[in-house]
Image (cartoon, grey):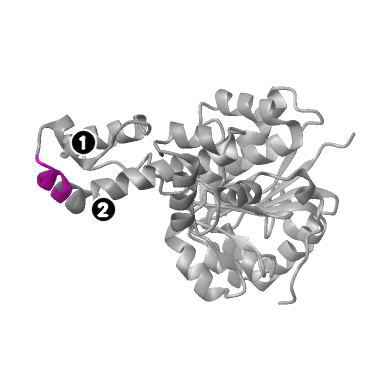
Amino acid sequence: MDRPLIVVVGYDGIELIDVACVTSGFEYANRLGAAPTYQALFATPTGRPVRCDSGLQLHGQAKLDGVGDQIDTLIISGGLGHEDAAANSRLVSQVRRLAAASRRVASVCTGATVLAAAGLLDGRRATTHWYHAQQLAESYPRVEVDAAPIYIKDGPVATSGGVTAALDLTLAFIEEDHGAEMARRVAIGMVTYLQRPGNQAQMSMFTQTPRPDQALLRRVTDHVVSHLDADLSTTNLAALVGVSERHLSRLFSEHVGRTPGRFVRDARLEAVSRMLVGTREPLSAIARRCGFTSAEALRQAFVAQVGIPPSRFRTMHTPKQQAAREPVTVSSP
């Protein structure tokens, strides 16, 4: 069987991590026995080296117009040069051509700008680095931009959030191709998360911690995220660190930007969204583990926050193998 060809597109101003997460992830799967093994090809507009954001140079292995058909996965790198790349009509034309010859198409970080310029995101839901999401939405109104998720798969087209989210998307592709166990082994080998679900926020409740000088708040937030099923009332949290409820609320407002109760609710709902996608546990069990009094209480809170019921969210965000087989369609520029 032919080796699946992974074509990674680079240009001046790319982010080195965007390339490395992808190529290293697929290569690690090769080491662990993925069959057939992946073949990665780094292509640039001229076939010559490109300059990374960091100042380092990456040597191109092929010129874009020299890459043929029968591509398994086309991946557009992101970086500070994404706007210039999207304005390069020859580059965009080649991306459009290669996409039509690919089984699936993806971008990492701000590479979504190039896909949008090629018309590949028109009518699709897509994400990018959270900092550039508003700009993408304003520049390409036919794209349904969602800045929150780590990655989004809309049929055969996928987009990922900022920088290391590229690895999460790569793990999702490896699972799609070779199963969850292979993706798990790659994640362990690369000493990374055991594949965060795509709906997890780029700016996660579980990684947003107060400044180092706020040891009291760090203690409270650490307690919240590790004891979601406990009584996390403001009264109990204040007693935990020996301050008044009023003082704790003031600290949260000043340094976290929300009340203690809002922080608890958001942390619980993020955990719910992860469990809906990452497990098969029934809603009642998820409710207990995340601190809700009942499945109905969870459902009401989830609808109020997300806008759809948990059951629909689980259906929408559970990967579907058949989606990868849909044809890639390109809108007219």
Could one spot residue 119 in this view of the protein? yes
Q: Residue at x 63, y 67 (%)?
A: 116
Query: At x 79% / y 56%, what residue is drawn?
Result: 66
Residue type beneath disc 2: Arg
Find residue 171 and report its horizontal and vertical position in percent: 63, 37
Residue type for callout 1: Leu
Q: Earlier in the sequence, mark 2 or mark 1?
A: 1
Give the structural element (helix, strand or loop) at label 1: helix
User: Where, quadrant-wise, is the C terminus in this rendering?
Assistant: bottom right
Q: Is residue 188 left or right of residue 6?
A: left
| Whether label 2 touches label 1, CB < 8 Å | no
Q: Which residues are magenta?
A: 244-250
**Residue at the image point whose x is 51% and y is 40% from the top:** 274
- Which of discs 2 and 1 lies nearer the camera? The answer is 1
Q: Position of residue 71 (x, y in %)?
A: 80, 49
Q: Is residue 230 above or below residue 107?
A: above
Depth check, front residue: 250 or 130 = 250
Residue picked out by circle 1: 237
Query: Residue under circle 2?
Result: 258
Q: Position of residue 94 (x, y in %)?
A: 74, 64
Q: Determine whether the residue tagged by mark 2 lies in a helix, strand or loop.
A: loop
Residue 76 in view, yes or no = no
Magenta residues: mostly which secondary structure? helix
In terms of image quadrants, where is residue 267? top left
Tell which of 300 and 179 is nearer to you: 300
